[in-house]
Image (cartoon, rainbow, N blue to C red):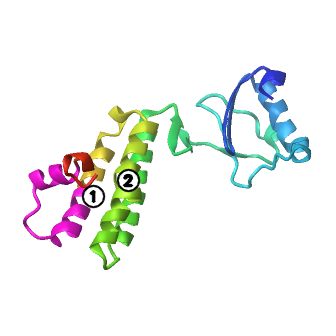
């Protein structure tokens, strides 16, 4: 498709991004709709089309496609947008989703299991992915909120919400394992 239509195109697993002239985009969409299934390309019902502000198609040319009229979209966990406030809102939404996961994890009765889950998949991996997928300068409030959530979670796991968990203990807990931290 990239060579045949002479467009900028990126794909990762089942997510495809295409940038090019309007008419070419319409031809590619038609290709996906008509020839795609014969070539093994099946379009998900969750597929959406997003165009940056001021660059949209008329509704009759996009028959059968879902077009979102927002400031941006999520692609592979990162924000694609033209408005910085979208990145901030998306980051805060991801942090709140992570908080729900951490709250659910806290229902477990085993602190060691809670700590392993927090280290392996709920805490810093989520924060690192958030920082790598969007400009950090636009996510200050989300980062501060995530740090607060991690601090509260660690306090609950380590000292059962007792008073003996302050800044120093949080700093020690967040150090790498090679420096005697929790990772």
Q: Main secondary structure of the magenta part?
A: helix
For label 1, the crowd category at 10 Å Cα-Cα, with few meaning under 14, some 14 to 19 and many 20 or more, is: some
Residue located at (74% from left, 53% from top):
44
Residue 2 as seen in the image, left or right of residue 108? right
Residue located at (52% from left, 34% from top):
81
Q: Is residue 160 magenta?
A: yes
Residue marked by disc 2: 95
- Residue pushed farthest left? 164
Q: Is residue 124 visible?
A: yes
What quarter of the picture does the N terminus occupy?
Answer: top right
Residue marked by disc 1: 149
Q: Is residue 152 magenta?
A: yes
Q: Where is residue 101 in the image (x, y as percent from the top left)?
A: 40, 65
For label 2, the crowd category at 10 Å Cα-Cα, with few meaning under 14, some 14 to 19 and many 20 or more, is: many
Which numbered disc, 1 or 2, marks the residue that appears first in the sequence? 2
Camera-nearest residue between 182 and 162: 182
Q: Is residue 170 above or below residue 32?
A: below
Query: Which quadrant holds residue 72?
Result: top right
Residues in magenta?
Answer: 150-174
Q: Where is residue 140 in the image (x, y as percent from the top left)?
A: 29, 40
Q: Position of residue 73 (x, y in %)?
A: 56, 42
- Residue pushed farthest top? 6
**SS under mark 2:** helix
Query: Which quadrant holds residue 19?
Result: top right
**SS under mark 1:** helix
Camera-nearest residue between 73 and 57: 73
Camera-nearest residue between 122 and 135: 122
Q: Is residue 41 above or below residue 8?
A: below
Residue 72 as seen in the image, left or right of residue 162? right
The reply to whether dot 1 and dot 2 touch (C-beta < 8 Å) is yes
């Amino acid at each position: 498709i990239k060579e045949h239509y002479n467009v900028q195109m990126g794909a990762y697993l089942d997510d495809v991004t295409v940038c090019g002239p309007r008419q070419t985009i319409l031809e590619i969409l038609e290709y996906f709709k008509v020839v795609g299934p014969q070539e093994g390309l099946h379009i998900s019902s969750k597929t959406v089309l997003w165009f940056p502000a001021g660059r949209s198609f008329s509704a009759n040319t996009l028959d059968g496609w879902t077009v979102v009229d927002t400031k941006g979209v999520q692609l592979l966990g990162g924000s694609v947008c033209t408005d910085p406030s979208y990145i901030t809102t998306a980051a805060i939404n991801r942090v709140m989703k992570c908080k729900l996961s951490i709250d659910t994890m806290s229902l477990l009765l085993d602190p060691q299991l809670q700590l392993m889950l927090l280290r392996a998949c709920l805490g810093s991996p989520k924060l690192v992915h958030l920082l790598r997928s969007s400009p950090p300068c636009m996510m200050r409030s989300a980062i501060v909120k995530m740090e607060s959530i991690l601090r509260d979670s660690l306090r609950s796991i380590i000292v059962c919400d007792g008073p003996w968990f302050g800044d120093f203990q949080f700093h020690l807990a967040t150090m790498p394992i090679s420096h005697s931290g929790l990772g």
